[in-house]
Amino acid sequence: MTNSETMQAEAAEAEAKRQTDKPPDPYAEVRRNATGGKPREASAISLRGVQKHFPGGVVALEHIDLEIEAGEFFTLLGPSGCGKTTLLRILAGLEDATGGAVAVGGQDILRTPAHRRSVNTVFQSYALFPHLNVRDNIGFGLRMRGVDRDECQRRVDETAKFIKISDLIDRDVAQLSGGQKQRVALARALINEPDLLLLDEPLSALDAGLRSQLQVELSQTQQRLGMTFVFVTHDQQEAMVMSDRIAVMNDGRIQQVGPPEDIYERPANLFVARFMGHTNLFPVERTGDGSLDTPLGSLTGCGDCIGSHVLIRPETIELLPPEEAGDNRFRARILDRLYRGAFAEYQLECGDTRIAAIVSNRGQRQYDPGEHVALTVDSSGLVFLDE
Amino acid sequence: MSSLLAKRKSASGPGHWGQTTHLLGTIAPGILWIVFFLVLPSFYLMSIAFMSNGPYGLPELPLTLQSFRELAGFGFLGWSPGNLYTLARSVWQTLIATVLVILIAYPLAYYISTQPASRRPLMLLIVVVPSWTNQVIRAFGWMNIMSPDAPLSDLAASAGLISSEMGLFPSNFAVVLGLVYNFLPFMVLPLYASFERLDGEIVQAAHDLYARPINVFRHSILPQTLPGLMAGTVLVSIPAFGMYVIPELLGGGKSMMVGNLVASQFAEASNWPLGAAAALIMILATLGGLMVLRRLGQRLGGGKEVVL
Amino acid sequence: MKRANFRRGLRAWWYIVLFFLYAPLAIVVLFSFNSTRTYSTFQGFSLEWYFKLFANETIVSAIYNSLTLAIVSSILATVLGAVLGYGMFRYRHLKLGWLIWFIYLPLVMPDIVYGISQMTFFVQIHEATGLLKPGLLTMIIAHISFQIPFVALLVYSRLLQLDPLLFEATQDLYATPWQRAWYFIIPTLQAALISAFFLSFTLSIDDFVISFFTAGPESTTLPIFIWSAIKKGITPEINAISTLMIGAVFTAAAISYAIQRARLASNPSRK
C-alpha cells in the first residue's frame, strides 16, 4: 500500500467519522426504515374545478378548488353526505370525477386508474384481506408491483417495527383488535411510500380512549415521515387536534380552508361556526347611529363590520359584578355552572336569550346559579358572519 | 360548455370500453349457456305443446290446441277422466307427503337444536347423508322392504291390510312413503336453522304469560319457526310434485303422477305434443304453487326472503 | 316429570326416524351379501354378487361413465358458474334482476320437464345438423346447465358477504385486474369454489332423470344401469352395485366431516 493511498483512506475515514459525528436528523432513521431506504420528497396536490355529478342530477361535488401543500396533514371535515368521502375516492381513483383536474406533484392523475396511482388509502373498515395474515396484508402492495419476496419481507419487517406491530406480524387478521387493525391498515398503506396517503375516518370505529391515543400517534407518524396526508372526518375535535389545515365542506362545496385556529376562531360563515360547535350566534341589525342591534342589546365599537350574524366566542366573554355597567355590558342571570377543572362553563340568560361563557378558574370570581352579572363582550373578538 | 366537454371525455375515457367487455366476459358465458341449453329447449318444448302429433309421435305443423283437449280427456273414444285423475292425484299425494314430512321433521329439528352444539353438525349429517345416495337406489331399498315376501309385507298381510301374495308396492301408499323418505331432510335443515335462531327469551316470556304449553307453542314457538317451515314446504312440495322416479318404481299405473304422464308420452305412447302440453301444465302448476306459498308466507308474516 | 317424558319422547322419535332413514339402505347392503336370491330371509354370507359384478363389463363402463360425467361437468360448471356469480356481483347495480330468473329457472323446473326438454332439443339439433349425438357429451352439457345456477348463487352470496371495500383496497394497492383475480378473488373464494365443486359433483351423481333422458346407448351411467336392471326384475347384483354407491357416499361424507372437524379444531377463530 502506497503512502498516498493510505492518506486517501485516512481522509475518507475521517470524512465518514465527521459525518457520523454530525448531529443526526432525528427522523432520518425512521424515515429510511419506513420507506425502504430511499427518503423521498413529499408531493403537493392541486385540485382545480373538480366536480362530481351522479346520474339523476345528484351533485356530490360542485367545483372544488384546493391546494394541498407537500408534507401537510390536511383534513376534509364535514357532516355525512357533504362530499368529503367522494372527494377522497376521486383522489384515490376509486371514483371518476365528472370534471376538473387533479395534479399530484405537478402531474395530472385523473386519467390514471387507481392501481397505477401512487396514492394509498386507509379505509374506514380497514379492508384487511381476510385470506392473508398480517405480514402478507402489509406486503400486498409491494408484491403487486413485483418487488421480490426477500426485499418485500425485509421492508414489511421494517415498517412493522416502525408502526410497532412487529409482534402481530404472523397473526391472522381475524385475531386483531380494532386498534391493531387500524395500525396494520396504516402499515399496509405506508409501506408503498405513496405520494399521498388518504385516511377515510380511520378512527371512527374505535372507542374514545384508544381513539385519542391513535390521533396522537397518527399525527406523529405523519410528522416523522413528512408524507402528505389527507384525512377525512366528521369530528371537529379530531380535525383540530390532528391537522395542519382543515377544509370544511358542506353540500359538495368547500366552505372554508385554513389552519384549525382560523376555522375555530374566525369561521367564514354560519355553517362553519355551527359545525365547529359554536352556539353564541345572534342575528344583528345595523341601526342609524352606527351601533348594532342584537338580542342581547346594542353593541358598539365595530363600525365597519359586515354580516347578518355575530359570533361571540364563549372564551372572550367576561363576567363582572352586576353593578359595573358600561358599553357592551349586559345584565344577565346565571342559569347553570359546569365545573370543568381548569375553567368553568356558564349558561346565562340575557333577556330571552341564552348565551354560554367560559371563564378560567384561576383568579376569577365564581358565580352561582341565580346570581346576576354584567356580561362583558370584547368587541375586538367578535366575528361577523353571513349565511 | 367545459363541463359538457368533460362529460364527453369521461364517457369515452379509458376503462369504459374495458368495462363493457368485462361485463360481457363475466356474465355472458354462463347466461348464454343457460339460455342456449336450458331456456331455448324449454321454449321449444312449450312450443311443441301447440303442434299437431305426426304419424311417428313427432310434432308437426299446423299449430293446434288439440293436445290440451286430449290432456283434458277428449280422445277418439269420447271423454275419459284419466289424465285429470293423474293431475289431481299428483296434487293430493304432494299435499299428504308434505304434511307428513312436516309432522316428522318438526320434532326432529327441535330435538337436534336442543342437543349440545358440538354434536349438532354430526346429527344433521346423519339425517342428510341418505339423501346423497342416488334416488333410484333409495327407491330400490323400499322395493326390497315392501316386496311380497319381506317381513313388512307379511306384517301388513297378517293385519289384513293387503292380501298375502301381494307386496306393499305398487300402491299409492308406497309412493307417499317414498316421497316422505326422499324429502325429509329438505324440511329438517331449514327448520333446524329456525330453531337454532329461536329466541329463548320470547319462549320464556310466553311460558310466564300462558299456562298451557299449547299456547306457548302457538304464540311464541310457531311464529318464530315459520320462515323455516315455509322454506321447507317449498323445498319439499315443489320437487315432490314433479317427481318421476318414485311413482315409476313404487307406484303402478294407478299411482301415476304428472311426471310419469309426461315421460310416457315421450317414450312408450309417442305423442310429443301431448307430453309437452302436460309438461307445460306442470310448469304452470309449479309456478302457481310457488306463488301461493309465497303469498302464504307473506300473509303469515314469515320469511319473505326464504320463499324465493 | 312431564318434561322428562317429553324429552324421552323426542329422543325416541329421533331413533325412530333414524331407523326409517337407514332401513332401506341397510336392507340393500345386507342382501348384497346374501348367498341366495330370496329377499325374505338372509341365508348366509357371500361375496358372490360382487364377483359377478366386476366380471360384468357393462357395469365397469357404467362406473367409468358416471365418474367422467360427474367430474367433467362439475369442473366446467364451477368455472362457468363462478365467473357468472362474479359478474352478477360486480354488476349488481345494473339492475340485472331479470337475469336471476334465468338462474332460478333450472332450480324450479321439475327434473322430468327439464330432462325431456333437453332430449327433444338435442334430438332436433342432431337431426338438423348431425351434431350433439345423444351420449356422454349431451349428458355433460345437460348437467352443466343445472349445476351452473347452484355454483353462481353460491359464489354470488359469498361475494355479497365480503366487505366491498376489499375490492377497492386491491386497486388501491396497485393490483391490476388480473392480479386482483389471482391474488384476491380466487383465494378468497377458495372455500366457496371447493364446496361449489362438491355440490356440483353430488348433484351430478345423484341425478337420474336428466341423465336418463339425455343419455345415448353407449353412455349408460350407474343409476341408469340400476334403473334398467330394476325394470327387468330385482336381482341381488343390483344390491351389490347399490351397496358400492352407498359405500362411496358414506365414505365421502365421513371424509368431509373429518376435514371440517380438523379445520375447526386447528383454527377456532375462523368460524
Image (cartoon, rainbow, N blue to C red):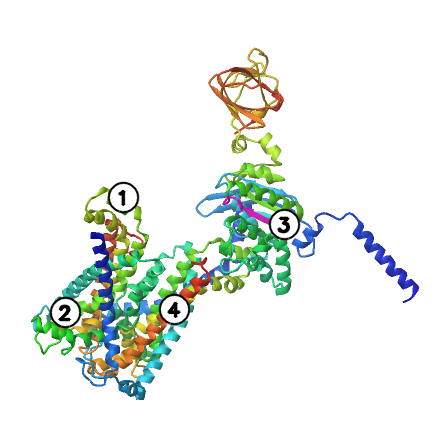
Crowding at mark 1 (Cα within 10 Å: few <14, some 14-19, many 20+): few
The magenta stretch is A197-206
Q: Residues within 10 Å of mark 3 (few under 14, many from 20)?
A: many
Residue A269 x %, y %: 55, 31
Q: Which residue is under mark 4?
A: C256
Cα–Cα gap, marks 4 and 3: 53 Å
Name the front one of labels 4 and 1.
Answer: 1
User: Could you tell me how far apart the alpha carbons at marks 2 and 1 are, in whole angstroms?
Assistant: 45 Å
Disc 3: which residue: A104
Residue B297 vs residue A323, the one in the foreground: A323
Q: Residue furthest right?
A: A3
Give the vertical position of A103 relative to B56 (above or below): above
Q: Residues within 10 Å of mark 4 (few under 14, many from 20)?
A: few
Q: Disc 2 designates what residue?
A: B172
Circles 2, 1 touching at the beta carbon (< 8 Å) = no
Nearer the observer: mark 3 or 1; the answer is: 1
| Amino acid carrying mark 1 in the image | Ala
Question: Disc 3 and disc 1: Cα gap in Å?
Answer: 63 Å
Residue under label 1, please give it.
B205
Viewed as shown, does residue C202 lie left or right of B56?
right
**Depth-wise, is mark 2 or mark 1 nearer the camera?**
1
Dot 3 falls on which chain? A
Q: Is residue C224 visible?
A: yes
- Does the image show residue B257? no
Mark 4–mark 1 contact, CB under 8 Å?
no
Kind of residue sitting beneath label 4: Ser
Q: Are marks 4 and 3 in contact (CB under 8 Å)?
A: no
Q: Are marks 2 and 4 in contact (CB under 8 Å)?
A: no
C-alpha span from label 3 to label 2: 79 Å
Give the x, y percent position of residue C149: 35, 65
Callout 3: SS: strand
